[in-house]
Amino acid sequence: MKGRASIHRDFTVATIDRRLYSAFIEHMGRAIYTGIYEPDHPTANAHGFRKDVLELVRALHIPAIRYPGGNFVSAYKWEDGIGPRQDRPVRLDLAWRSKETNQVGINEFAQWAEDAGIEMMLAVNLGTRGIEDARNFVEYCNHPSGTYWSDLRRSHGVESPYGVNMWCLGNEMDGPWQIGHMEAKEYGRLADETSKAVKAFGKGIETVVCGSSNDQMPTYPEWERQVLEECYENVDYISLHKYFGNSSRNTLNYFAKIEETGRYIQAIGGVIDYVKAKKRARNDIYICFDEWNVWYHNREQDSKNWRSWDWPEAPALLEEDYNLEDAIFIGGLLNEFIRRSDRVRIACIAQLVNVIAPIRAERNGPAWVTSIYHPYRFASLYGRGTALNVAVDGPRYDAEAAQDVNYLDVAAVLAPDGRSITVFAINRALDETYELDLALHGFENVRLVDHQVMGGNSADARVANTREHPDRIRPRQGTGVAVVDGAVKGELPAFSYNMIRLSID
């Protein structure tokens, strides 16, 4: 299989926001307890956080993390998680039908985020609570001193404010499953007033309003229009959520869902433009794709479990064993975010540890990475800078999710210093190598620095990393790709994800 592609230094999409490679973690299953926090674990630090997990998290260079939910936040009282641990109440979490001990609250999580080198992106409860509680939460986190909530924080041992600048206004409020679900106009009004209150605490604060929880909702995309018409001038981002699966085991259709995601982003971009024009607004709103991942391997059984169990504490939930096929898919989804970085400024993989996550951690046992960890890490490390337009001319296929899909999925990023290019290339063909010819226009003295490859055999599609075999799926050094006459040429193995780094002397 042969194809041609080209990039030009002057043909760009956008400067990629560093927060495109953010993450999400929720009080759900074992994400927090025995995931990041396990004070009795052999590797636990003085704050009770697992150092083995922290090491894997730090290697991802995550810029920001959304917390504490998710569905969990829509009935959460943040005050339950502050003050002496022995005085904190145990609550029933209605979202996931489990007990919440509140041993990790905002101050503990802020400590973990500092240890991990990650900026916090906090969500407020607009399901069972509202403006006043959101205002108090921001004051507790952000005001220096001299007021009730700021001095309460200081009495809890946190002298300096956290200075949190990203605030999510609820979660999936379009969903009937959400505690406190509202109609679009009702939610839009509440979000508008809450955003104004939150932003009153100082310049630099940004807010994220809830868009559709997925693009199959009956209210999509009318929800976005109605919500934005109520709050457009006072918010900065609208959220998108989407989870993916391949229950039918149709690999090419699975990969075609990347194109479906592009249509989703494009549609909401159109809604944003429409509302901006209708309101004669001067400000721009961007997309925060703050929940995305593969979620289907255990979804049906997990749904039965959490609806029937008797309020356990930190139960195993949504612990997916991701395979090679999932890793290639995740690489493609990250490529789509790069290609749409003019619209998508923030994106958060959901979630980070144990719950549909790139990192797994066994209670009182080891931590390891799932297959999706690797393309996520490569994108976070090398996908920062300027997204370049990539023109692709090659074989295509049709699928149920999308038609006219390129077998070659490629994104390219010019580093901030202009001295290197990273190409993320996927050969979606199951059994054929792809003879790549990627022309590099406007660049001189380009040489190959590195080529990492995952995959190469669709017979391994269902192979996954496990506790016993944590390195089954991992990158290896690629061969057969070189820079020849101003182009990247060579063969991409069948069914493979490739990270190709080029230097510009």
Image (cartoon, rainbow, N blue to C red):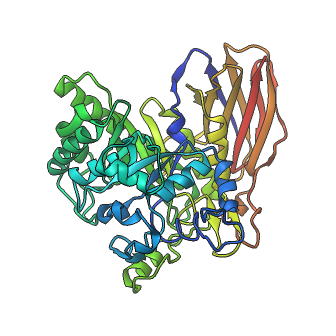
Left or right side of 130 for 436:
right
* Quarter placement of the C terminus: top right
Q: Check the image and report above or below for 202 versus 377.
A: above
Q: Nearer the viewer, residue 76 or 201?
A: 201
| Residue 248 image point, x, y percent | 51, 66
Image quarter where the N terminus lies is top right
Q: Nearer the viewer, residue 425 or 298?
A: 298
Is residue 91 depicted above or below 202 in this figure?
A: below
Whether residue 465 is visible to the viewer of this picture, yes or no, is no
* 142 in relation to 219, above or below: above
Q: Is 249 on the left or on the right of 182, as rendered?
A: right
Image quadrant in which you'd find residue 460 = bottom right
Which residue is painted at 70% across and 15% down in the image?
A: 443
Front in this rendered view, residue 177 or 6: 177
Q: Could you say which quadrant of the image residue 105 lies in?
A: bottom left
Q: Residue at x 35, y 75 (%)?
A: 91
- In the image, taking residue 192 as reference, residue 77 lies left or right, namely right
Residue 189 place in picture, x, y as percent: 16, 45
Instruction: Find residue 453 and report its horizontal and vertical position in percent.
Output: 75, 46
* Point 24% across, 41% down: residue: 197
Residue 212 visible in the snapshot: yes
In the rendering, at what x and y percent does residue 54 appear? 65, 56
Exactly how many numbered labels are in the figure? 0
